[in-house]
Amino acid sequence: MSANWDVHVIEFARSKDQPLIDLVNGASPSQVLDLPFGFVLAQNGDRNVLVDTGFLNEGSGAEFSKKFGIPDWISPVRMLEELGVKADAVTDIILSHAHFDHMGSISAFTKARIFIQKREWLSWNEAMALPPQYGFLTAIINPDNMRSAFDAAVEHRLVLVDAGHDIVLV
């Protein structure tokens, strides 16, 4: 593996009228912003590493796209293919957090190891197990994405990272 990585920042979706109050507590309800959605591809030799994955706009992913007002979308898988990277060539995924727009296409990358903070993973699983009146806490989490991550765990591809540790891709 070389010391040099090729890094691509890939914008796959855009919400041109995203209410700022959805993102910033206390913001004016009338303020909107043009919000891009993206992920990162880092390449080194035969390593294709994603930092986040974007989301698929099908099934429950389409519901989230509509719920959060994201009309402009291109498949993250298609965008990678246009860069010459097939889904099964992705070797590793590093998730910044478990929101739908960050881990919403992990199901497409069936050979990749998936890294996520242990506290992040366990906290969202715990929150989803709360009674229905607390459902607002997990409004940004797609249960189907969590199921895909669980499937990766069953296949020994989910790596829970403790805080304070570095991820070394070898």
Image (cartoon, rainbow, N blue to C red):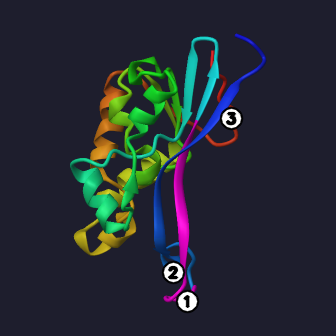
Q: Amino acid at mark 1?
A: Ser
Q: Quadrant of residue 77?
A: top left
Within 10 Å of the Cα at label 1, are there few (<14), some (14-19), or many (20+) other Cα atoms? few
For disc 2, the marked residue is 21
Q: Amino acid at mark 2?
A: Ile
Query: Mark 2 touching mark 1, by CB under 8 A?
Result: yes
Q: Quadrant of residue 164?
A: top right
Quarter of the image for the N terminus: give it.
top right
x and y percentages locating residue 3 in the rendered image? 78, 17
Disc marking residue 165? 3
| Residue at 36 percent of width and 63 percent of height | 138
| Residue at 51 percent of width and 49 percent of height | 97
**C-alpha separation, residue under disc 2 versus residue under disc 1:** 6 Å
Q: Which residues are magenta?
A: 27-40
Disc marking residue 28? 1
x and y percentages locating residue 48 in the rendered image? 55, 22
Q: Nearer the viewer, mark 3 or mark 2?
A: 2
Quarter of the image for the C terminus: give it.
top right
